[in-house]
Structure formats: structure tokens, C-alpha cells
Amino acid sequence: MKTLQFLTCLFLLSLSLLACKKDEKTPVRSTPTPPPSNQPTVSWIDNMSDGFANGWNQDISGGGKWQFDAVEKLNWSIINNPSNQAIGRAEVSRRLTTFTNTDKLVTVKGKFKMALTAEDNKPNEGGWVIQTMAWGYRDPNDSIVYKPLVVARILADKVDYLVYDYIWDAPNKTYRPKTGFPVSRIVRNAITAGQTFELALTINFSKNSTGYVKANLNGVDIPAANYVGATYPSIFPQANVQWKGGTYSSYQGEHYSKIGVYYLATDQPQ
């Protein structure tokens, strides 16, 4: 009798174990979904690892020069200007898009290294690194005009961008900035010497309030730096928009800057 009870218990235990085993399911390993990227889309890029791609125009003046660095794989944009007369620049430029009085969305992007010092161990003042400009049209004075629209800067103590607007000064036959312009939006407040910055501007060029600028620094959107408002001055006709990369001091006078350019990129056909 005891033997029968033992066998019965053993049989029931076996059934229980089989049932448990049957209910066990092999865990499914799911591939984690990568976090959404904040990086703006680009479709054209010049890595500048062996000089500039075809199509760039070099703009050099005021103690400016380009110096390729085969070790760092970048081009140093250098201004070493002790003069009070010249405006220093070491830039490359090319056509970006055409504004046709209809809102136009573009992204421009670059990766830059602010050297610890400028040449001759001068303090590195930095300057404009990405520029968009209304380019090459005739103003009411019948002069060919080139005016900045949205410009990014790396200065000694900050990274920011500027938005420009103008009015026509008829008595002096020239443009002057509207009151309150250029508007500055701070992307980062910090000492920049020795730092590398990957900076992108998404710009909706518009003569209306639908214009805006959004900044992305090192892969992170900076909503606090967003600008909303007209981004293409209403006084300007439809025209080509040019873009530039490098360093530009934007004023006459002594200026020292050394900024390396790893690449320039855009989502616009080039």
C-alpha cells in the first residue's frame, strides 16, 4: 500500500514538473530602440581633410590665412591682424540657396576647434564661423550688396548667433540695422579656448513672422536659444543666399583668432 502511495505521489510530481516546464517560455530578446537623434539632417558635407572641396571661394584679408593640419585633420582659419585699418578674415564661401519671397528652410552645420591661443601666443578672440548672407544684388543706389542674415560666432567667452534686419537710409544711400538688431541668441556661455564645438543652425528664411532659427550644439537642441521672427529683411528683393565658413572679425582693428574647421555641411544641394 505504501509503495502504491509512493508511486502515485511520484507520478503526480512528474506531471507537475512537466506542466511547469510546458508553461516556461524562452524570453524574447528585443533590440533596444535607439533614442531619437537631435542631429539635423545633412546631405552634403566637406570634411576638409585634404583641403577644400571644389566650388568654394576663398576670402582672405586683414592678416587672414588658411593652414591645413594633417595631424588634426582640419583646416585652421587664422587671423593675425595688428592693424587698425583692416577687417580680418579667413573664409570659404559658396552658394547656399535662392530666396524667392517664399519661406525657405535650410540647415547649415560645422565642426570647429577653438585653439588655446591665436598665433604668436595672442589671446584667441574667435569670430564669425558660419554665415548666411543675402548676396550680390543691386540696391536703390545701384550698388552690389552683400549683407549678413544669420551668423554664428565662437568668441572667447561664448557661442552665439546673430540675426540681422535692415532699413534703407535714403539720405545716406546705404543700409543700416533696424533698432534692436542684430539680435543675439546665446547657445553656450563658457570659456571656449581649447574646446571643440559641433554647431548647427536650422533657419527658416522668411520676410514674415513665420521665420525662425534653431540651434543644435554637440548633438543637443538648445531651445532657450531659439529665435522667432523675420529672418530675411523685407527691404531685400529675392536673391541668392550665400554661406561662409571660417573666421571673420566683422570690424576694423586689431584682431587675433585661430579656429580649426573639421567640416562644413548643409542639407541644400551643392
Image (cartoon, rainbow, N blue to C red):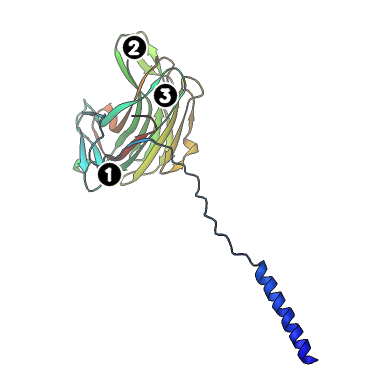
Rendered position, 76 above or below 29: above
Which quadrant of the view contains residue 248? top left
Amino acid type, residue under disc 1 in the picture: Ala
Q: Circle 1 sits on which residue? A: 115
Rendered position, 33 above or below 259: below
Label 3's element?
A: loop
Q: Nearer the viewer, residue 247 or 67?
A: 67
**How far from the left and from the top, in percent, is residue 170?**
37, 8
Q: Circle 2 sits on which residue? A: 139
Compute the Cα span from label 3 to label 2: 20 Å
Q: Circle 3 sits on which residue? A: 181
Label 1's element?
A: loop
Label 2's element?
A: loop
Q: Residues within 10 Å of mark 3 (few under 14, many from 20)?
A: few
Q: Nearer the viewer, residue 27 or 39?
A: 27
What's the mark number on residue 130?
none
Amino acid type, residue under disc 3 in the picture: Phe
Q: Is residue 188 left or right of residue 22?
A: left
Which quadrant of the view contains residue 183? top left
